Amino acid sequence: MSRKKKQTMDWDDDPVGQELMPEVEVAKVSLRDFIVPAKVTAFVNGYVPCREGDDGYEQFDDARLREVFKAYVCSLGDPLALYIEDLQMAGFQMACSMVTGEPCIFARRKS
């Protein structure tokens, strides 16, 4: 017994199909597209960098930064890395806490 080969239509080989399906330019999406610069600006306007133990300091570890910026891992990567990069450019540096041993940003609210 012989089997017939099933033919399939390839739109690239069909001139009529090409007319019906115009070329669509696909915009490349990057992780930076998911960053909201206004959130970084708001943080920088509301806090100043400080050191652990300074009066009124707050500790921003990964979990708290994710909550503040709503920066959750997606299929393109981890947007938190870009938020931290933007914060570092504004003067906020990651440091290890002496209490928890966890990397975090120390900041206090502006008066």
Image (cartoon, rainbow, N blue to C red):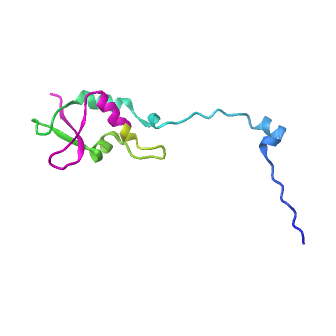
Q: Which residues are magenta?
A: 82-111
The N terminus, quarter of image:
bottom right
Residue at point 17%, 33% (across, down): 50
Residue at point 25%, 28% (across, down): 91
Indicate whether 61 appears above or below 90.
below
Q: Is residue 15 left or right of residue 53?
A: right
Is 110 magenta? The answer is: yes
Question: Looking at this rendering, what residue extends furthest in the right direction?
Answer: 1
State the image coordinates of residue 99 (x, y, percent, origin top left).
14, 48
State the image coordinates of residue 47 (x, y, percent, origin top left).
21, 31
Residue at point 28%, 27% (across, down): 90
Query: Which image quadrant for residue 104?
Result: top left
Is 59 magenta? The answer is: no
Residue at point 44%, 34% (across, down): 32
State the image coordinates of residue 39 (x, y, percent, origin top left).
33, 33
Q: Is residue 29 left or right of residue 103?
A: right
Q: Is residue 12 left or right of residue 98?
A: right
Indicate whether 3 appears above or below 39.
below
